[in-house]
Image: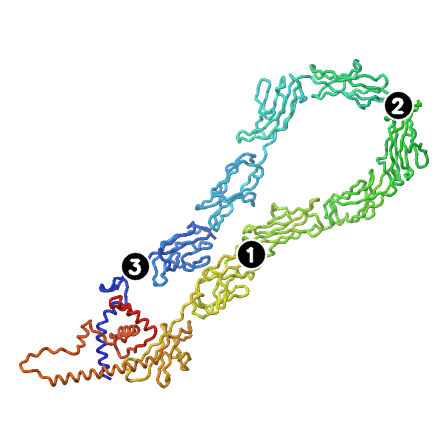
Amino acid sequence: MWLFKVFTVIYFTACAAQDSHTVSMFGHVSPTNPLPSSTEATTVYEPPLPSLQLRSRWSDVFPSEKVEFSCYVTGSADWTFTWYRNTQRVQGPNVSLTADGSTLTITAATQTHHGSYSCKAHHKTKRFTTKSSNSIELTVYANKPKPTLTRSSNFDKMFPGESITFTCRVDVPSGWVYLWYHKRTDDIQATTDNTYTIASLDHPDNGQYHCKAKRGKYPFYTEESDTTALQVSDPPKPSLELLSSWPDVFESETVELSCEVDSPDWTITWYRNEEELQEDVQLDAVDSFLNITSITQAYEGGYACKAQLQSRRVSSGFSNHVNITVYENTPKPTVNKVPGFNPMYVGETVNLNCKVDVSSGWKYQWFRDGIELPATTDTHSISLALAGQGKYWCKATRGEFISTDFSEEIQQDVHEIPIPSLKLITPWSDIFLTESVKLNCGMNGSPDWIYTWYKNRQEVQVDKVASVDSNGATLSIRSASAERAGQYNCKGHLNDRSVNSSFSSGLTLTVYKEKPGITLTQDPEYKVMFPGESVSFSCHVNDSFGWTYKWYKDKNQLIASGSKYSLNSVNTSNRGAYACQAKRGMGQAFLTDFSQTLRLEVEGKQPKPLMTQQPDVDKVYTGESVSFECTVELSSGWAAYQWYKDGTQLPINTSSFNIRDSNLTNGGTFDCVAIRDKTMYNTQHSDGRILRVSEIPVPSLKLITPWFDVFPNESVTFNCGMDGSADWKYMWFKDGKLVQEDNTASFDSDAASLSISSASASHQGQYSCSGKLKSRTVSSVFSEGLTLDVYERPQADIILLTGWSEVFSTDSLVLRCGVHVKQWNYTWFREGQLINLPPSEKHTITPQNDPEQSVFTCQGIRTGRPSYSRSSDSFKTKNLLLKRRVLLSISGCIFFGIIAVFLGCIVLRVIRKPADGEEKPEEAELFLTMAQLMDRDDTACPMVQYITDAELNASSKEADENGTICSETTPLPITSMEDQVVSSEIQDATEKNGGLISFR
């Protein structure tokens, strides 16, 4: 046995000397320790330098603007990236990274983000880091800029047609789009040019103007500029006046006009038929006066004037027009008479009228049958007699030179005894029972006639009901009855002569048997009125006419007689029940029944409307729509509304309005006032409703469990929150994709927590969340991402500690369990069942405790994380014992073979003697010395065929520690499926690389 040990030590010492150079060459290869020239050349490259790029457009930004950087390595995607600001690692709020870190996003910049940015790249597999990239300086201004608004014209008052240009200037970097506003709410337009021009002003352009600017894909807005007021007014309208006596003139007469304007800065221009007048010898235009002397028909037309402001090229509209008519010839007068009857009767009076339709200022002359009458006015009155019959005409004169032609002739005949005229004195011919009526018969108003009355051609007898006046001209029926109905006529005769007229025309009198219906209405028909409002009641009789009315409140008569009873400003004392009654006639007037009663309610307190908001919440978020509604439950007729925000009236007159796509400027206190459509009565202001508009918060993502790097089967819990509010529900994302609930990932009822019950490699990635209101369609942006790393548990390995020298002296095997991380305890398993022994690094196998030659595994355990390792590969003791037996047999054969050879050599040396005188050749040494073995590099190691890669690794390690490869503690070879695969790979590598073996 001891000889075998000595032989083994000598053998492996020689092998170590032969192969030590190979191990030293390949054990550590680096750019500073390259392979020797005899091996295949390897090129070592410097790591590439990453490139940093600003993806957003500006490197100088303002608070809340978004900034994006990207970092990349050209030609490869196998990199992750780390970001630095002023050489410090980038972290903090409003900063997010993509999964591989190649894109850095600052969602809302603040001054804490100001500085120089750079990045480094880390190779995912080769474990080395590049140098820093190029740097980009990010400037973050402290405050939002405020534009300056100027205008091209600063006149207090502008006129229609003038132009003006507004300029909006931002004294900071470029890239702005300018937004223009008119009257605070009207968004005019957005332009990249910083000017806004109104080429031709008009009245709708009145009001306040301001501007602001924006830039970027997710727009950043500046402050609003100060406002500037623009007033557009009409130019003053001139007033034109005719100073001469008349506008209708004849040739050679003079016309004088004046044009007045309120402002002294304006000059006057004259127009005829809307064409500007050119001065000539007959026109004398001085300042605001125009004289036309010796007028001709060429100057006839409509005269007007305009006022002009020469310095600004502004002209007023036309003044009022004065039409000047110029006649070439004198007119011919027209004549008529009043009354125009022909013939007329003796005693009547006729008025003759002479009229000249052209101009004025005329004097008149009258003629009858060619004889001039003593009359000089345009009207000539004649009390007719038979001698007054004849032909009449006239003519007119004006001034010293103008005289008309004679008028046409008018014939007047004079006759006697006209037909009587029957008239109804009372204004109605349809009457009711007990009502009175009066009829009149006349002969053109002459008092010389006496009259007789007839009903249905029968003379009316005077009695207590029917009576006549002194000359019988008036018939009075005091109380009508059914027998008084019929057709009435009259005749007349002269008092001094027995001259009778013929029957007058007939008049039919209708008598109703029932009283008429009466209707009472209210305007406006509001159920409840309020102090200060106006209301009127109307009373209407359905039949006939001529009614006067009586008015009652609570059955007490009011002082009123018209068909309407109006209350111009009601108060609580006007409450009550209103009714009316109609009457007509004098003395014993006819009265209708009472109308129905209308109740007037007057509320003493000014009503207050109810303002509601949808959604009915205390706070809304930007982008949401909000609607307000104003209602008054009391009474009716509320048709117009006034809305106020922070005490300022809004341009809204409907009962409701919406704010679409709300922003922070929409916040404030809102209230409303309702107005009646007919009385214009307004309510109190409603209670104010405060609208708070907030930016949608960014979700806050937290890890509840205490670590980001976990191991398989461990649990992980994330929590997502929105300012602590319970109004949100949440969605979860991993690497930008929506997380679905399954057996390993679950959510709580509102998805505020994401729980992973058993982590695996599939759960590794960057997690983020977003919020959505439960009751409204409001969604937040993504939270800042949190990266979860899932690491593999360390692998336990079994090593056989029983050495080569112990193969011949023991039947037991000592196994050692190891994990590359220290501070572990170990448990052992046989055939998958736990061995009930205290945890130990080593386990001894003997025929007594393992008679069946089983399969062993081990597992590391400890109190830290991870608390246990993966199980080791299986170790089969049966194969090991078989190898030991084979090895013992071979070793015995070799040993006894060497003894036999050695003894044989001794015998031959003793027996064989050299011949005398024979030259002895130099004897070759059968075995090489240790020094010779170490000097040679072609000596084969006879045990190399039994040694696997794992053994080489162990031998290499022991060689490093002990300076030799072969020793008594060298583990016996253990062949497993992995060993066979590795051996195959070694053989292939040997064939391809000329005998060099790559150790794994």
Q: Where is residue 562 in the image (x, y as percent from the top left)?
A: 80, 40
Q: Tell me the residue that label 1 is attached to.
A: 777
- For the residues labelled 2 and 1, say whether their Cβ atoms are less than 8 Å apart: no
Mark 2 → mark 1, Cα distance in angstroms: 98 Å
Figure quadrant of the N terminus: bottom left
Mark on residue 873? none
Residue nearer the viewer, 523 or 316 = 523
Front: mark 2 or 1: 2
Going from N to C along the chain, the mark reached first, 2 or 1, is: 2
Q: Position of residue 755 (x, y in %)?
A: 49, 67
Q: Tell me the residue that label 3 is attached to.
A: 45
Q: Tell me the residue that label 2 is attached to.
A: 417
Residue nearer the viewer, 573 or 969 = 969
Question: What secondary structure is found at the residue carrying circle 2?
Answer: loop
Mark 3 → mark 1, Cα distance in angstroms: 55 Å
Of the residues shown, which amino acid type is indicated by label 3? Tyr
Q: Which residue is drawn at 38% across and 79% down?
A: 855
